[in-house]
Structures are given as C-alpha cells and as structure tokens.
Amino acid sequence: MLSFPISLPCKWYSGSFDTPELRMISRYLQSWLLEEGSLTARLKATCEEFFVEVLSESRQPVPDELSRLFPDDEIQMWCREVLLWCDNQPVVYAQSWIPESLQAMTKLGTTPLGEVLFQTPKWTRGEVEITLIDEPLYELLDKLNLKHETKSARRSVFTQGEFSMLVCEAFLLEPKKT
Ligand SMILES: C=C(O[C@@H]1C=C(C(=O)O)C=C[C@H]1O)C(=O)O
C-alpha cells in the first residue's frame, strides 16, 4: 500500500558522477540532476502541457536521517510530495520539507514550488547530492504503471536567512530532449 511520505534512502553522494555507484546515470540525465536553475522552468520548455499533481501535503515529524540538515528546533515540518507531469508523462517525483512558518509555501497547491523559490532570488541553493533509488519508489511506480527500475535523484537544501528547506527530486522518466 503506497503511503506518504515515501521514505527515501539515506546514502547521498556529492554532485559528482565519478563514484562507481553513479556511473550508470546517462550524461543527459546528469545534466538534469545538476541543473542549477528551476527544474520546473526547464521541464516546461520540453513539453506542451505541464502540471503539478499533489500526492500529499502534511505536517510530519522530520525523519532522523534528515534532522541534521535543519536547525535543531525543526521537529515537525511541512512535507510536500508531488509529481511533475509533462505531456501526460510523470517525469519527476519531488519531496520537499518546508518550515511550517513559511505559510505561503504550505498553501502552494498545484503552483510549482520552483515558481516561488526562484522568483524570490534571496533563496540560495546549497550543494546538490545525488543518489539512486529503487525499492522505495516501486509502489509509486506501480501506481503509475511504470516498470520497477532504479531511478536517479537529487536533493539540495535551499536557505533564506534562518529558514532551510530540503527539495528532493527523483526522475521517474527521462525528460524529452529539445
Ligand atoms: C524547486 C523546484 O520546484 C519544483 C516543484 C516542486 C513542487 O511543486 O513541489 C518541487 C520540486 C521541484 O521539482 C524547481 O522548479 O526547481
């Protein structure tokens, strides 16, 4: 039974692909995983119809493996999980951990987080980490009628003053080449 939040793996690698575990990632996908701009904006440029499907949004205890990424007092955060659809293809699964005090970010609905994050330039992105995910995504892949395959993912922490937000994105499909 698919339940949210999806528990993602703990092993993440710094944004280089020379580690043996990441060698299977194509150069094309590497360019997406290291995309410095908005993923939303880049995906929109590859398709006619783009939309965000909200899978789950709720207040959640911060998982132990994520707690070191946030200030000590962030015990509960707003967890947002979405699919980014391009021309009826579920290209990205994203899971974001947002400080509850950022009211505007907890009421996004189908507005892409990136449209807010990248419009207010004072948010800065930290180091990009990469990983490969298999079983944790299998139930979501089943729901989407996609094959059980290992997927590549990235995550980074965005900061603005005392606020920190974690954005993780897993590519379920390769974005169309433009
Ligand atoms: C951070 C971005 O926002 C995208 C949209 C998200 C959402 O709406 O929840 C989450 C992660 C990203 O894939 C981006 O566009 O780069």
Image (tube, rainbow, N blue to C red):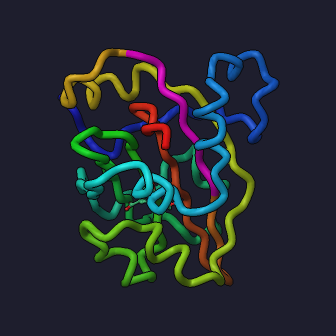
Residue plotted at (42% across, 37% down): 7
- Where residue 14 sits, quadrant-wise, is top right
112, 174: nearer the viewer: 174
In x, y percent, where is residue 88?
Answer: 22, 42
Q: From which residue to which does the magenta span run?
A: 149-156
Residue plotted at (63% across, 51% down): 35
120, 174: nearer the viewer: 174
In x, y percent, where is residue 163?
Answer: 60, 77
In x, y percent, where is residue 174?
Answer: 45, 32
- Where residue 146 sits, quadrant-wise, is top left
136, 82: nearer the viewer: 82
Q: Is residue 153 magenta?
A: yes
Compared to residue 96, the image places residue 163 above or below, namely below
Q: Is residue 53 left or right of residue 96?
A: left
Compared to residue 140, the image places residue 123 above or below, namely below
Q: Is residue 5 left or right of residue 168?
A: left
70, 118: nearer the viewer: 118
Q: Is residue 112 left or right of residue 134?
A: left
Compared to residue 149, the image places residue 100 above or below, namely below
Residue plotted at (55% across, 66% down): 165
